[in-house]
Image: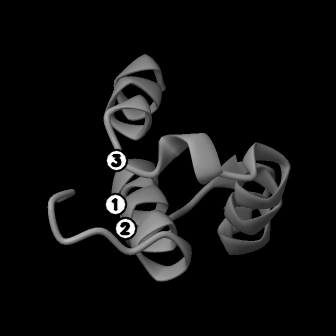
């Protein structure tokens, strides 16, 4: 998780992020199976897709 946070703080629009909203979005996208995370995509990939959806920036990958 620290790597995800480091990547987020490098985003050119980081100061605009609504962290509470992003956390809620990630919770909504989480998939659980018998109490264990079961995701088709990595957490980091889902976070990047969410950031790009709400805070697009051509210079951030």
Does 30 appear above or below 4?
A: below
Disc 1, SS: helix
Find residue 24 and report its horizontal and vertical position in percent.
83, 60
- Could you tell which of marks 3 and 1 lies nearer the N-terminus? 3
Residue at 48 percent across and 64 percent down: it is 51
Q: How far apart are marks 2 and 3 (CA)?
A: 24 Å
**How many numbered callouts?**
3
Find residue 1 and report its horizontal and vertical position in percent.
48, 26
Q: In this view, does 47 lie to the left or right of 42?
A: right
Q: Nearer the viewer, mark 3 or mark 1?
A: 3
Q: Which of marks 1 and 2 is in front?
A: 1
Marks 1,2: beta carbons within 8 A:
yes
- Could you tell which of marks 2 and 3 lies nearer the N-terminus? 3
**Quadrant the C terminus occupies:** bottom left
Q: Is residue 45 left or right of residue 30?
A: left
Marks 3,1: beta carbons within 8 A:
no
Marks 2,3: beta carbons within 8 A:
no
Disc 2, SS: loop
Does 52 appear above or below 5?
A: below
Q: Is residue 33 left or right of residue 14?
A: right
Residue at 75 percent across and 52 percent down: it is 18
Of residues 15 and 52, the one nearer the viewer is 15
Q: Which residue was labeled with disc 3? A: 12
Q: Which residue was labeled with disc 1? A: 45
- The quarter of the picture where residue 54 lies is bottom right
Q: Which of marks 2 and 3 is in front?
A: 3
Q: Residue furthest top?
A: 2
Disc 3, SS: loop
Q: Distance between the residues labelled 3 and 1?
A: 18 Å
Q: Which residue was labeled with disc 2? A: 41
Q: How does the figure colour the protein chain or chains?
A: one colour
């Amino acid at each position: 998780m620290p790597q995800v946070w480091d990547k987020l703080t490098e985003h050119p629009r980081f100061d605009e992020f609504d962290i509470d909203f992003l956390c809620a979005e990630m919770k909504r996208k989480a998939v659980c199976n018998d109490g264990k995370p079961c995701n088709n995509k990595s957490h980091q990939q889902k976070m990047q897709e969410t950031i790009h959806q709400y805070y697009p920036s051509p210079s951030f990958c």
